[in-house]
Amino acid sequence: MDTRAPGRAELDRIHENFPSGAGEVIAGRSDAGAVAAGIQRAGAAGPAARPIVVMPSRPLLTTLLLGLVALCCAACVGSSPTPLAPALRGSIGVPHHGVITDAVELPRQGEGYRLLRSNGVRWGTARLVAAIQRAAADVARARPGGEPLLVGDLSARFGGATRGHRSHRTGRDADLLLYALTPDGRPVRSPGFVEFGPDGLARSAGDADRAASRPGAEAHVRLDVERTWLLVKSLVRSPDAHVQWLFFARWLEALVIEYARARGEDPELVWYAESVLLQPGDSTAHADHLHLRVACTPDEFLSGCLGGGPYWPWLPAMPQLVPPPDGDLAAAILDDLLPGGAAAGSRVAAPDGAL
């Protein structure tokens, strides 16, 4: 069995296999992506990074077969529940091509957060909504006195295409705006979708207007790295969220990860965060917000939830088809082909009246 210590180069190779961002997933790539990348972690707890184990090929083939079967079933019915496919419920299809049933609405405001817009695009799976509420509350309790987390779009009531998004169609995506400070460190309300540079500074449109009329007025805000890390930490540690991706600009990820290391956070937790943080390759760099995506659970996978990136090995194992032993398979084939076999003898023509 091949084992090797996890490293940044390993993660980069995984990310290169899944470069998708706002448009995100190439159709047909199921949650077995991480298996295809050949990774499995031995356990999810402990202070240090665990070894990575290369999985055998047979579970890979059966997992991929399960994904193809589910994908074909979803494609046959247009990725939506119908009387012909009553088992398709919840988050159905891949994030950029699917729908959702039984969606949960994120309230307009709650502990530590409020919605940015009132456009009705605030529906998601129960796990996604609960993860946002829990993470915002965790940040507010850990660092009281700050401004609330601004939450952008989730999905429409029944999923499908929404304005301004190529994904956000299956209730598994949410845009989380970034916490902000004044340059001298005072918490301020997020100015909206403004891009933060490698120095952690962003030009605030509202402050810029004031600066034009009042010389010396502040025209920039600074990324609140501490609260941003606490948000990422809460999401990654959540036992129910099953974070698949946190799309984020590479230079802002560097600021957040270096902060986490400097304060002595659990190396394994930091490794998880590095794994899910990714600058997408087919959309904007995401320097103005975090794009949260949660993975399918095993039950959701069986109900039509597909794709969206790798399925990280620290998440609950996906169901796998169990192939019959080679001897039983060969015997069944020969029994059906050879004259006088048991299978042939069992097939007796039904009387005409029974047809």
Image: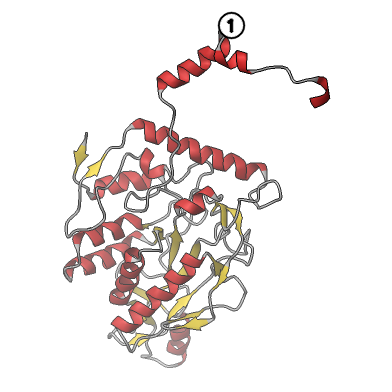
Q: List x then y, in percent, for residue 320.
A: 43, 40
Left or right of 256 on screen, residue 104: right
- Which amino acid does the dot numbered 1 rest on? Pro
The quarter of the picture where residue 122 lies is bottom right
- Front-most of 34 and 206? 34
**Quadrant position of the C terminus in the picture:** top right
- Front-most of 43 and 278? 43
Q: Is residue 355 visible?
A: no
The residue sitting at the bottom extreme is 214
Q: How is the image coloured?
A: secondary structure
The residue drawn where x is 26% and y is 55% is 44
Look at mark 1 in the image and give the residue it sits on: 339
Q: List x then y, in percent, for residue 35.
A: 36, 41
Q: Is the residue 35 above or below the residue 164 in the image?
A: above
**Quadrant position of the N terminus in the picture:** top left
The residue drawn where x is 57% and y is 61% is 165
Left or right of 301 on screen, residue 340: right
How crowded pointer 1 is (Cα within 10 Å; few <14, some 14-19, many 20+) is rated as few
Q: Is the residue 83 above or below the residue 220 in the image?
A: above
The total of numbered circles placed on residues is 1
Q: List x then y, in percent, for residue 340.
A: 58, 7
The quarter of the picture where residue 354 lies is top right
Q: Is residue 31 visible?
A: yes
The residue sitting at the top extreme is 339
Determine whether the residue tagged by mark 1 lies in a helix, strand or loop.
Answer: loop
Q: List x then y, in percent, for residue 126.
A: 50, 67
The residue drawn where x is 43% and y is 44% is 319
The residue drawn where x is 29% and y is 48% is 11
